[in-house]
Image (spheres, rainbow, N blue to C red):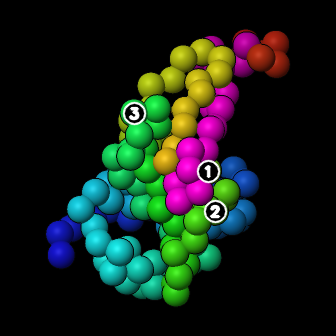
Amino acid sequence: MREIEVKKIDVFTTRPFCGNPAGIITMADGLTLEDMQRIAAVLNLAECSFVMMPDTPESIFRVRFFTQSVELDLSSHSLIAACFGILEEGRIPLQHGITSVQFDTNIGQVPLDIYFDSQPGSMDGSSE
């Protein structure tokens, strides 16, 4: 098996090792169902997301979700973690305000709005 980068992202928090952890593989193209299931079992987190190229032209990525034992049709916290992971890598171009994207999942296309402030501090009136 090839070398795979795995991220552990804590969702619903700004503090490390708090919130709801999810495992994320942001470059999952080429992994088989068995590969994804084995990786999720080894990571032993509530859920793991596997990000790959989309099935449809309207979506930016396809995401599959696994627990240690089964594939899920959708995991909202794991989808948020996957989105954060690919945002970290600069793979979603952001604009000031709202960037709307869609992800392909087993239940179909899931829309997600990303709120981005290109001028930090401008929303709350502070100058820092």
Which circle's residue, 1 or 2, is located before the other in the chain?
A: 2
Kindly identify which residue carries mark 3.
57
Give the percent coordinates (x, y) of residue 91: 39, 35
In the rendered structure, does residue 42 fall within the stretch colored magenta? Answer: no
Task: Specify start and end residues of the magenta stretch as a single range.
Answer: 105-122
Kindly identify which residue carries mark 2.
75
Q: Which mark is residue 80?
A: 1
Q: Please identify, in this view, whether the residue under mark 1 or under mark 2 is nearer the observer.
A: 2
Report the residue at 67% width, 27% height from top.
115
Secondary structure beneath dot 2 equals loop
Amino acid type indicated by mark 3: Pro
Nearer to us in this view, 33 or 21: 33
Amino acid type indicated by mark 1: Ile
Which circle's residue, 1 or 3, is located before the other in the chain?
A: 3
Report the residue at 31% width, 77% height from top.
35
Q: Quadrant of residue 93?
A: top left
Report the residue at 34% width, 46% height from top.
53
